[in-house]
Image (cartoon, grey):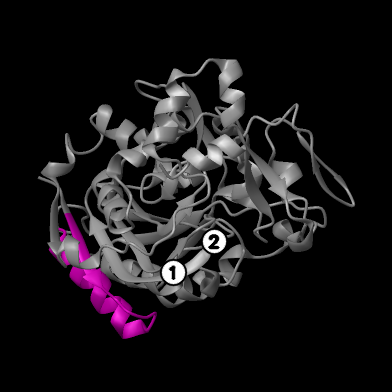
Amino acid sequence: MPKVAVVKCEAYEPEKVYRAVARAVELAGGLEDVVKAGDTVLLKVNLLSALPPERAVTTHPLVIGAVARLFRDTGASVWVGDAATTGGLRGEFSETDPFGVCGIRETAEREKAKIVNFNRTGYQKVKVPRPKRLREINLARPVAEADKVVSLPKLKTHELTLLTGAVKNFFGCVPHSDRSTAHSFAKPEQFAQAVVDIYSVCRPSFAVMDAVIAMDKEGPSGGRPFSLGLILASHDCVSLDIVASQITGFDPTDILTSVDAMERGLGPASVEEIEVVGEELKDVIRRDFQKPSTYTGAAYRGLRRLLTPIGLKFLQSYPRIEISRCHRCGLCAEKCPTGAITINRYPGIDYRKCIQCFTCYEFCPAGAVRVRRSWLAEQLRRK
């Protein structure tokens, strides 16, 4: 029976965070069966953009530092890694040190951990076992070379998977070319399958989720910092995501990465198998956590399955650029897998090419990409 530890941590204060993380790890079963002295442990953090910790876009450095210390105390060597956003019209995301801006480099140096930037360490081709969407991926070399891999996600909403957690965190282990391929599967179910394809080869041994300050509304980069006050930990990433979805008011079946992983035998056979330890689940559920605008209710999803391709046009959602919020960084155009966005002073979208993958929505650091719905889709969205 997989365990998920839920521990309160009300603020990002060094001692509070360390105690909460250590307690969560202990309740989840400890590290004795995870790592041994001499192992190399990769902490896969969420480093979506070079933004300061208070924006709640990236894993907080205090959480990373606490986990690094716990693994170093076992005699392991620790790597801290991810592939941060690069590019932009002025190259600002390539020239900036994302690990420094996010406070992670200083933490890694203090905890004697090694920074590994996947954009620089390179990738190697790996075949996906029992693939659904991606038969082969380019996997970051540190993920393949580490003895143990640990997921350190930030709890946030997401435009396609609804929540990004311990499973979706491994999407950052492949280069942008592979991510574009995954985003080209515009249906949420197909995108989730591509994410789980990537997750299935990353073989994580443990996960610690930063949910002290989460992100609701329009995550994963343009949402609202939301004080949840929790640290979650588990040996099983899928079980952790299921509990996180329950805490934030989702039905676990809403989170398609969890559903697909369970179907493949990569997580618990059922939600009922999961044992929550620490705080009682009923005491930490937050009904005021707001879902992303891409969230759809059961009536909407049921109708989509019944409609013909022509009828589906009445339920379409599209990205829309809010010029007043746009910083003109150009990431939306650069990351669009179909070339539907061009920059002519400000971004413009060619809806004939748009496949509604919402990659632009995910990467926009200014929250300038919004979701536009048909009238019928809006009426059904929350039913």
Residue type of the residue flagged with mark 1: Phe
Bounds of the magenta segment: 4-28
Q: Nearer the viewer, residue 297 or 22?
A: 297
Q: Residues within 10 Å of mark 1 (few under 14, many from 20)?
A: some
Residue type of the residue flagged with mark 2: Gly
- In the picture, measured across the screen, residue 12 lies left or right of residue 57, that is left
Q: Residues within 10 Å of mark 2 (few under 14, many from 20)?
A: many
Residue under label 1:
226
Name the quadrant containing residue 228. bottom left
Secondary structure under tag 1 reads strand
Quadrant placement of the C terminus: top left
Secondary structure under tag 2 reads loop
- Which of the numbered marks, if any, corresponds to residue 211? none
Residue 8 part of the magenta segment: yes
Q: Is residue 41 above or below residue 101?
A: above
On the image, the x and y values in percent for residue 189 come to: 44, 29
Q: Is residue 318 above or below residue 88?
A: above
Residue positioned most to the right: 344
On the image, the x and y values in percent for residue 317 come to: 60, 37
Identify the residue at horizontal 62%, vertical 25% (top origin). Answer: 313
Q: Nearer the viewer, residue 321 or 32?
A: 321
Q: Is residue 222 above or below residue 359?
A: below
Q: Nearer the viewer, residue 177 or 310?
A: 310
Determine contact: label 1, label 2, CB under 8 Å.
yes
On the image, the x and y values in percent for residue 10 come to: 32, 79
Residue under label 2:
223
Name the quadrant containing residue 337. top right
Residue positioned most to the left: 1
On the image, the x and y values in percent for residue 241 come to: 31, 49
Identify the residue at horizontal 21%, vertical 64% (top origin). Answer: 6
Residue 187 part of the magenta segment: no
